[in-house]
Image (cartoon, rainbow, N blue to C red):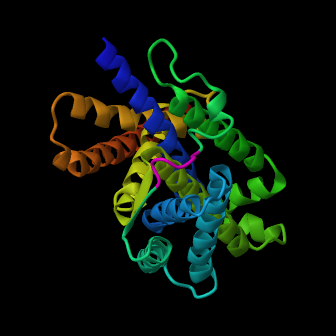
Amino acid sequence: MTELLNILKVTLEEGFMYALLALGVYITYSILDFPDLSVDGTVPFGAVITGVLITMGVNPWLCVLISFLAGALAGSVTGLLHVKLKIRPLLCGILVMTALLSINLVILMAGTGGKTIVSFFNLPTIFSDLPASLIPQKILGFQLTALFVTLLLALISKLGLDAYLSTKSGLLLRATGSNQQYVTMLARDPGRMKVLGLAIGNGFAGLAGSVIAQQKGSADLSMGPGMVVIGLASVIIGLSLFKKVRFLKATTKVLFGALLYKACLSAALALGLPTQYLKLLMAVIFTIALVSSNILKKGARRAALTEGSIADA
């Protein structure tokens, strides 16, 4: 029983961390309909910056903010490549992701004296600094500090994104992905909104990288590969499974999607799946999510056509 509760605790902790990433991917993939692969670079970008800054004595919460801004900067570069230079979205993401591989390595080696990993296990992080230090070390025999902190960050990020999307700028951002001509008719530049959306989306990716690094106590370049799959799978699972749950906002569905995705991975590992197959399992879950999403969409179209035929009759 204790082992099961520990697995649940870790699943929730990591699920809330990856929910931050999923919120960013939701903006680029679902709202803007932009296949942004630069996420695989911006997550370790935020992690590496956080790791180096923490070893320099910078406040860990300030590191989180700086990582968000750094990710936003990388995302804006992706947007500018597409809007100003007319490069295809997929290629823009690949270009920025490739560039960040070198940038991350340069930052790491400059901050660690030539090492390719930065460790800060005994230094203050958001999980040991205020307000986390006010939480009791153990509750009912479990260390729940990380769970409370990640839950708090996920809720703040979700509510903040909801608040932004309800503003005039947020509504224009949503319209940019679905109807660019409408945005142009309002005398607004859809290209500018794309750059803004990509900046916010990758800002969340950088934020996720910072939190993941602080939870691990280290940062390196291996954190990047597979992050876009995690984010996309979380978005697709959440939006597909809870599609008919009207009272849930899309951001809430994405958050649940991240938790379910992580739960699937945790269950597989608990059942004895070797860790070397983890990336393969991630790809399989992502494929199932994509296929299920397409089947549900086709079913919805058929139902709509059937209703239309009955109405015409």
* Magenta-tinted stretch: 120-125
Q: Nearer the viewer, residue 218 or 35?
A: 218
x and y percentages locating residue 298 in the rendered image: 39, 43
The answer to whether residue 257 shows anywhere in this view is no
Q: Residue at x 42, y 26 (%)?
A: 9
How many marks do you count on the picture? 0
**SS assignment for the magenta stretch, majority:** loop
Q: Residue at x 39, y 49 (%)?
A: 230
Kindly indicate the quadrant of the structure image that contains residue 102.
bottom left
Q: Residue at x 35, y 43 (%)?
A: 289
Q: Nearer the viewer, residue 310 or 1?
A: 1
Q: Is residue 4 above or below residue 188?
A: above
Q: Nearer the viewer, residue 149 or 206?
A: 149
x and y percentages locating residue 247 in the rendered image: 64, 26
The answer to whether residue 69 shows anywhere in this view is yes
In the orientation shown, which residue stands out farthest toward the bottom? 85
Left or right relative to 248: residue 9: left
Q: Is residue 207 above or below residue 39?
A: above
x and y percentages locating residue 257 in the rendered image: 46, 37
Was residue 121 drawn as part of the magenta stretch in this picture? yes
Instruction: Locate the N terminus and report the quarter of the image it occupies.
Output: top left
Was residue 282 drawn as part of the magenta stretch in this picture? no
Left or right relative to 304: residue 8: left
